[in-house]
Every structure is written in structure tokens, then in C-alpha cells.
């Protein structure tokens, strides 16, 4: 089944008469043209979006720098990953070493810090308050999870507890974001 969308439909919704483009009223029945069908805006389909978020490239650049730093300062990681995935391929789960978990916690911590840096950049560039808020809350969440992974690497917390607390942390941050957005939306009206 094919559906065609006619972009311009200069016909009165009430009587079906054609009206001149730019007319404010139907020439046959007098119905205001504002009550006549209007084509959907381009923004509905994503073509006329206001601006792209090119700062996402900066964020990706931070990510690549962090990955490069982690791998260049811990050259043993690739062989550790290989051994871990080979054990999984054999059907045996061997938990990652505490050293690998520690480096993962460091990686997450640096990602969290980069989220705070991105929030600062967005504030300086006067972007909408939502993106810096998302970056800050994301940074809080990632650093919180990094701390939980660090505690696990030091054998102060089980991985099961890390997973539970990480889920709770993300849930709390989603609730906080929803409350803040709802509060500011309510103030605009």
C-alpha cells in the first residue's frame, strides 16, 4: 500500500473549494484558511532541524584520548582481554583480574571527568541548559559506577552489589533529570 503526502492542498476543509494561495478566507464559504489543512512542518521529519551537535565530535575526541592513554600506559591490557574472552569461548567464566578492574574504574572515572568538561564547554558556548545538565548527570553516574568498580577491584564489594548499586544510581539520576526538566518546563508556561 502506497501513501502519498501532498505538500500543498489549497482546498477548503469545510466546502472543498479551491482557494488562492495566501488567502486568509475561503472565497466560497468564508471559512478562515487557518482552519484549512496545512502541510506538516519539515522539522517533523528531521530535515529542518535547527542545529547539529558538533560538540559530540569533541566528546568523541576525549573518548579516543582516554582510550589511547589507557592502552599506552597499560600495555598488558590486550593480552588480558584476550585471555578473558578465550576463557568465555571455552565456556568457563574467569573473572577479570583486580588489576584489569582497577584500570576499568580509571577509564570510567576519566570518562566521567570528560562529561564534566563537556558540560563546562556547553555552558561557555551558551547552549541550551538541557545538554549541560545531561552531561553533568552522566558524569556523576559514570564516576559513581567507576567508584563501585574500584571498590570491587579492591575486593571491598562483590560484583553483584556493584551491578545493583549501579542500577540504583542510574535510576536515581533518571528521576532527578525528569524532575528538573519537568520543573523548568512548568516555569516556562
Image (cartoon, helix red, strand yellow):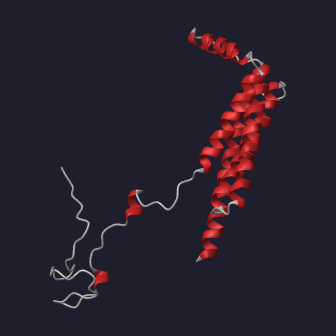
Tell me residue 75's x, y (percent).
Answer: 74, 17
The image quadrant of residue 105 is: top right
Left or right of residue 8: residue 111: right
Q: What residue is at 18 percent from the left and 89 percent from the top?
A: 27
Q: Return the x and y of residue 179 as percentages of the image width and height.
A: 66, 62
The C terminus lies in quadrant? bottom right
- Specify whether 104 is left or right of 184: right
Residue 184 position in % (x across, y down)? 65, 69
Q: As rendered, which of 85 and 115 lies closer to the eye? A: 115
Residue positioned 16% across, 80% down in the render: 18
The image quarter containing residue 114 is top right
Between 27 and 161, the one lying in front of the other is 27
Q: Is residue 90 above or below residue 186?
A: above
The one of 13 and 169 positioned closer to us in this rendering: 13
Image coordinates for residue 156, horizontal then vertical, percent: 84, 28
Which residue lies at the image location 70% right of the left edge and 28% below the top edge?
A: 68
* Horizontal relation, residue 46 to residue 87: left or right: left
Q: Is residue 181 above or below residue 146?
A: below
**In terms of image quadrants, where is residue 59?**
top right
Where 29 falls versus 58 (above or below)? Answer: below
* Residue at left offset 62%, top offset 50%: 55
* Residue placed furthest toward the top: 90
Q: Is residue 45 left or right of residue 185?
A: left
Amino acid at each position: 500500500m502506497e501513501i502519498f503526502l501532498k505538500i500543498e492542498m489549497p482546498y477548503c476543509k469545510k466546502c472543498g473549494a479551491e482557494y488562492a494561495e495566501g488567502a486568509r478566507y475561503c472565497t466560497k464559504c468564508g471559512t478562515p484558511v487557518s482552519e484549512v489543512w496545512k502541510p506538516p512542518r519539515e522539522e517533523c521529519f528531521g530535515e529542518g532541524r535547527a542545529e547539529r551537535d558538533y560538540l559530540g565530535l569533541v566528546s568523541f575526541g576525549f573518548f579516543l584520548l582516554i582510550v589511547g592513554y589507557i592502552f599506552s600506559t597499560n600495555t598488558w591490557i590486550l593480552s588480558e582481554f584476550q585471555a578473558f574472552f578465550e576463557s568465555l569461548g571455552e565456556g568457563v567464566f574467569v573473572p577479570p583480574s583486580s588489576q584489569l578492574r582497577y584500570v576499568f574504574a580509571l577509564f570510567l572515572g576519566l570518562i566521567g571527568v570528560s562529561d564534566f568538561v563537556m558540560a563546562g564547554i556547553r555552558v561557555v558556548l551558551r547552549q541550551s541548559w538541557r545538554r549541560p545538565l545531561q552531561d553533568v548527570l552522566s558524569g556523576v553516574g559514570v564516576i559513581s559506577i567507576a567508584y563501585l568498580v574500584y571498590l570491587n577491584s579492591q575486593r571491598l564489594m562483590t560484583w553483584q552489589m556493584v551491578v545493583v548499586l549501579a542500577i540504583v544510581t542510574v535510576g536515581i539520576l533518571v528521576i532527578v533529570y525528569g524532575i528538573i526538566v519537568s520543573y523548568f518546563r512548568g516555569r516556562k508556561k
